[in-house]
């Protein structure tokens, strides 16, 4: 059966778009679902970051499983899981049910993502056409993440919070028949190595360690922290030992011995984590503190996400002209300065300054993400390009998940301390602004008003403090990038 490669591209791009949008569309919905489900601060963090954590642990094994069973078949199964999980998420009655649905979404996404690129490479024999197709894939990926908050705001302006998930269903119901009819079916490779046990080990270690961090910051060093964090770290260490000893590791950690690849992966962590974590905290401040609607919050965040989408393509040209070291270092320094500026401005008054800092931060992080990819892929030996790509994609997804955890835990910790110092008698010690605002809404009257006012002031103080902390860490990364990329020239990075 003959097939049109451009129709294949249309089908896989339609499959890819909801997955990308789902990474950011939920951020503006957090205040709404927090109040609707009565979610605690920790539950909100799990709702957000269980998706990228599960996806990160499964991307590589799902890719190798697709090699065995065939890309089209694997893509169809992933789309079906994504559709069912989206429906379950939309109608989740509790925060725990939503967390489980988001985990299932992560499984479906991990089955979709590797097959999109594989099918593009398989469909296009001509190098020039394949390059064009991959360029379209890159633009769709960045644009999808950029419009996520705006799309969420539009939906929440007219519907309930579950609509940000339910919107996936009609799209998928149209995409599944398209993939069935337009994408060619090819047999898999029986010799492809699949290691699901290692993926389970990685995910279990991550979830236990992250749970321990959240528990530890909330209640201090206690039995619950030790019971989850220590086993999580041990499982991750075991996973690392298996990778180091295996002749065919799931993730080739030996590549981290190369300074450029190590710092490139660190940049991917920091950039993706900063973007995801900051978007989440900003959405909460805009709605809980400033009283913006979800749509207004999405529009307010446009300078950040749009500039991040533009930063990637422009970053490639900048790196080709000025060299990777200069571009990577300046982008990180610019991000640090933008975060510092945002920690001092008034989001409710200094609109021009805020928009300028947001756009500069987004552009810097977009350039930084591209620079991290160049550092990793340009420094890896040709025979290990696939392993380097797997390491990069896993690092990117982990960065997003852990960034949400890091920002969320720090903000909630500072918030709890600031709120407790001035809490009205009998109001309780709330662990997040969502919990405090839910209680204020329940009580109403003067007491509810005092709780809400104190919660807003405490969150602003927490937000500003955490932005300054992240700015200092990013500045330290700037120095590390400058030193690690000393021996890298533009000609050795694969930038043309």
Image (cartoon, rainbow, N blue to C red):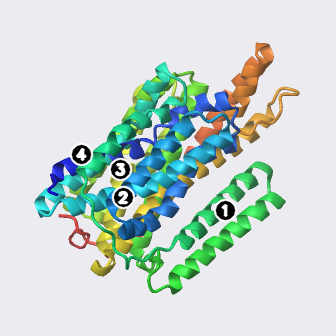
Question: Which SS class for mark 2?
Answer: helix
Circle 2 residue? 73
Report, in whole angstroms, how far the alpha carbon at label 1 lies from the one at label 4. Answer: 40 Å
**Quick one: label 2 or label 3, which is nearer the N terminus?**
2
Q: Residue furthest right?
A: 426
CA gap between label 2 and label 3 equals 33 Å
- Residue 264 seen: no
Q: Which residue is mark 1?
A: 209
Sequence-wise, the earlier of marks 1 and 4 is 4
Q: Earlier in the sequence, mark 2 or mark 4?
A: 4
Seen from the viewer's position, the closer of residues 120 and 236 is: 120
Cβ atoms at labels 1 and 2 below 8 Å apart: no
Residue displayed at 52% across by 63% down: 57
In this rendering, which labeled residue sits more in front, label 1 or label 3? 1
Q: Is residue 49 left or right of residue 19?
A: right
Residue ID for mark 3: 366
Residue 448 coordinates in the image, percent (x, y):
76, 19
Of pointers 3 and 4, the one earlier in the residue sequence:
4
Q: Nearer the viewer, residue 133 or 77?
A: 77
Q: Is the residue marked by circle 4 packed among few (<14), some (14-19), or many (20+) residues within 10 Å?
A: some
Label 2 to label 4: alpha-carbon separation: 17 Å
């Amino acid at each position: 059966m003959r097939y049109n490669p451009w129709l294949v591209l249309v089908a896989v791009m339609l499959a890819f778009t909801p997955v990308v949008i789902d990474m950011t569309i939920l951020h503006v919905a957090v205040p709404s679902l927090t109040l609707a489900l009565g979610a605690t601060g920790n539950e909100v963090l799990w709702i957000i970051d269980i998706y990228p954590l599960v996806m990160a642990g499964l991307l590589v094994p799902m890719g190798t499983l697709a090699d065995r069973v065939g890309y089209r078949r694997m893509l169809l199964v992933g789309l079906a899981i994504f559709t069912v999980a989206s429906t379950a998420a939309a109608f989740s009655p509790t925060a725990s049910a939503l967390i489980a649905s988001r985990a299932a979404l992560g499984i479906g996404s991990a089955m979709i993502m590797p097959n999109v690129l594989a099918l593009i490479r398989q469909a296009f024999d001509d190098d020039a056409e394949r390059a064009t197709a991959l360029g379209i894939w890159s633009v769709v990926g960045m644009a999808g993440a950029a419009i996520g908050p705006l799309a969420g705001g539009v939906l929440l302006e007219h519907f309930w919070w579950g609509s940000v998930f339910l919107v996936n269903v009609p799209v998928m119901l149209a995409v599944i028949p398209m993939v069935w009819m337009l994408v060619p079916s090819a047999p898999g490779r029986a010799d492809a190595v699949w290691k699901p046990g290692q993926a389970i080990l990685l995910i279990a270690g991550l979830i236990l360690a992250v749970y321990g961090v959240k528990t530890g910051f909330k209640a201090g060093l206690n039995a619950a922290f030790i019971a989850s964090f220590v086993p999580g770290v041990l499982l991750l260490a075991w996973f690392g030992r298996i990778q180091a000893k295996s002749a065919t590791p799931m993730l080739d950690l030996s590549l981290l011995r190369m300074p450029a690849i190590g710092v490139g992966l660190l940049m991917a962590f920091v950039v993706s984590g900063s973007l995801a974590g900051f978007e989440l905290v900003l959405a909460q401040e805009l709605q809980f503190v400033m009283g913006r609607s979800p749509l207004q919050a999405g529009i307010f965040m446009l300078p950040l996400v749009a500039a991040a989408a533009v930063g990637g393509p422009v970053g490639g040209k900048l790196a080709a002209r000025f060299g990777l070291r200069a571009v990577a270092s300046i982008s990180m320094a610019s991000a640090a300065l933008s975060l510092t500026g945002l920690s001092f401005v008034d989001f409710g008054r200094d609109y021009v300054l805020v928009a300028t800092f947001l756009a500069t931060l987004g552009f810097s992080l977009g350039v930084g993400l591209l620079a991290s990819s160049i550092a990793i892929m340009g420094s890896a030996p040709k025979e290990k390009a696939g392993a380097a790509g797997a390491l990069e994609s896993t690092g990117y997804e982990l960065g997003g998940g852990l960034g949400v955890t890091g920002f969320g835990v720090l903000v909630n910790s500072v918030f709890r301390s600031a709120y407790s110092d001035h809490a009205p008698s009998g109001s309780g010690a709330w662990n997040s602004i969502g919990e405090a605002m839910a209680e204020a809404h329940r009580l109403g009257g003067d007491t509810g008003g005092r709780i809400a006012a104190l919660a807003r002031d405490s969150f602003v103080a927490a937000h500003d403090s955490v932005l300054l902390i992240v700015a200092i860490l990013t500045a330290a990364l700037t120095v590390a990038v400058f030193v690690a990329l000393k021996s890298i020239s533009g000609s050795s990075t694969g930038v043309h």
